Image: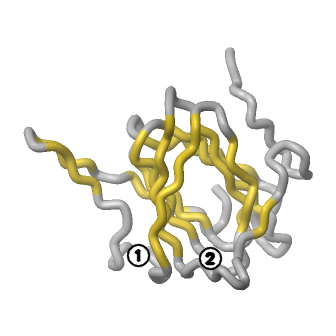
Amino acid sequence: MIDGVKIKKLKVISDERGRLMEMVRADDEDFVKFGQVYMTTCYEGVVKGWHYHHKQFDYMTVIRGMMKIVLYDNREESSTHGEVNEFFAGENNPIRVQIPPGVCHGFKCISPGEAIVVNTVSEPYAYDDPDEHRMDPHNNDIPYDWNRKDG
């Protein structure tokens, strides 16, 4: 596992009215601080990535559909520099993925239709100086192929 990445298995409480799932709590032992919460979606087969932040922690939870979330440790000083982690998250595997600053990340919708991610981040988005650094999803130095692995 990439240094600083944490996975929390989320508990879903269901009854005849519906379901409830806590995604991020201020008293979670890995929680850093609150910046903002946003929702993003991804259409079937689409890759969104790569990007990374200098200061921001991400706490990603897929609430609809399934996504392949992939992380790459781009931090030269890290003991896990160059390591790749792949997580399958969503309705069939309710987890929260904590992504520390400097770790490149992206995701691909692997279920039919549109998948939805709720991301709680440690920093509010700075419109005048965003902590958002992007790389092409396919043409880069990251040793990862987004294609499905059959077999």
From the viewer's perspective, is 116 left or right of 133? Answer: left
Q: Nearer the viewer, residue 117 or 82?
A: 117
The way the protein has been coloured in the rendering is secondary structure
56 over 93 or under it: above or below? below
From the viewer's perspective, is 15 left or right of 138? Answer: left
Q: Where does label 2 land, which residue?
A: 56
- Amino acid type at mark 1: Glu
How many residues crowd mark 2 within 10 Å: few (<14), some (14–19), many (20+)? many
Which comes sooner in the sequence, label 2 or label 1?
1
Extreme residue toward the left, this view? 16
52 over 11 or under it: above or below? below
Extreme residue toward the front, this view? 128
From the viewer's perspective, is 129 left or right of 90? Answer: right
Q: Nearer the viewer, residue 36 or 128?
A: 128
Measuring 47% from the left and 76% from the top, which residue is drawn there? 36
Q: Where does label 1 land, which residue?
A: 29
Measuring 71% from the left and 65% from the top, which residue is drawn there? 103
Q: For marks 2 and 1, give the CA distance.
A: 17 Å
- Where residue 55 appears, x then y in whole percent? 67, 81
